[in-house]
Amino acid sequence: MKWRLQMRSILSIFLFFFPIHLLFIKIKNFAYDNNVLKPTIIDRTVISVGNISLGGSGKTPFTIALSNFLYKKGFSVGVITRGYGRKNSHDSFLLDQQSWEDCGDETLVLKNNLDPSIPIYVSKNKIFAAETLAKMGCDIIILDDAFQHRKISRDIDIVLLTPDELVNKNKKTFPWGLLREPFYNIKRANMVITTKENLYNEKKSKKYSLSLNTKFQDELLCSIKNTNTNIESLSKINNLLSICAIGKPESFHNSLRSLKINPLKDLTYSDHYNFTKKDVDIIIDKIKKYSIKGIVCTEKDWVKLISFQDEIVIPIYAVRLNYSLNKDIEKTVLRLL
């Protein structure tokens, strides 16, 4: 783990002074834009859900909401995800009973919230995965996080933005900023949706008419079996510890404040962080030092933290999103199909 962090730091420094990846992005986009390279066409309706930043725009929640909506409309839907952060990243498989270590934390969130009839294919090879789902009878294939993956053709390209990405000072590409590619490439998208507007102080964008506020389910996930807890009950617990390992932790902290949940202490980690025994020891020290009564986290972190329930002992709660679209987005998707 330590050597990986060191290598990541060295790579970041190198890219800061020699951003060769930006040249690669420009060459790749030029090739596809001018038909030098041609994407593979799948004989099904393909919808890409992506973003232009390094994370935190709500791709997985949106994929869940979109997939369930289309399934309820009578379509046969299949979902493809890379399974970021899993142990064997080169494996390709139809999701069944794999643990988060084998399929990735976000993949497990997908499974826990999608209709059970919706198949999830885990693979870095989106073309192979799409062809497999097509053979299984899916007439709509949804690609989770595929805006930059131009090898496969798509009928609808959806890009999600958070309000902070619309501020000029944040429109910088990695390593100077958090964008995966220059902001102007957003013109490739059929739909641009501003998410989490109710969690940021920035003014509402007039340029992009579609927006989706973050809503929450009243009932929380709890690591202690047969324990039913809602948001109001959790807000009355004084000594809470919040743990967050997502792309934009400020959105989670803002969510807690909006729900009147005020943790005594916070622990923040990098996106998709793989908690270790050492991390758990630090968490246990916090629990003892500050008389912590419960831990509150995202659902993505919850699927990983519950494996340490025996050591942590106190309840681990997850605030759950309300996975739904609004009428404007539903109408736009159906019109584009």
Image (cartoon, rainbow, N blue to C red):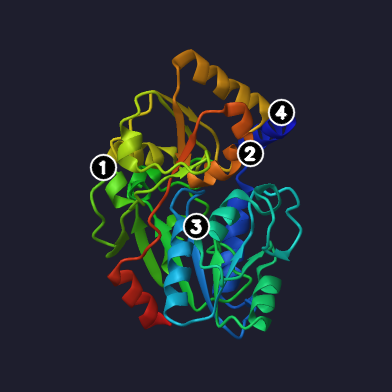
| Towards the viewer: 47 or 164 | 47
Which residue is tagged 3?
Answer: 60
Which residue is tagged 1?
Answer: 201
In the displayed image of the protein, which residue is found farthest to the bottom? 43
Q: Quadrant of residue 284?
A: top right
Q: CA distance from mark 2 to mark 1?
A: 36 Å
User: Which element carries disc 3, helix, strand or loop?
Assistant: helix
Residue 202, percent from left and from top: 26, 45
Residue type, label 3 = Thr
Residue type, label 4 = Lys
Quadrant of the rendering where the N terminus is positioned: top right
Above or below — where is 101 with respect to 297? Answer: below
User: Which element carries disc 2, helix, strand or loop?
Assistant: helix
Q: CA distance from mark 2 to mark 4?
A: 22 Å
Residue type, label 1 = Asn
Above or below — where is 28 with respect to 38? Answer: above
Q: CA distance from mark 1 to mark 4?
A: 37 Å
Determine which of the numbered discs, if any, sits on residue 2 in the image.
4
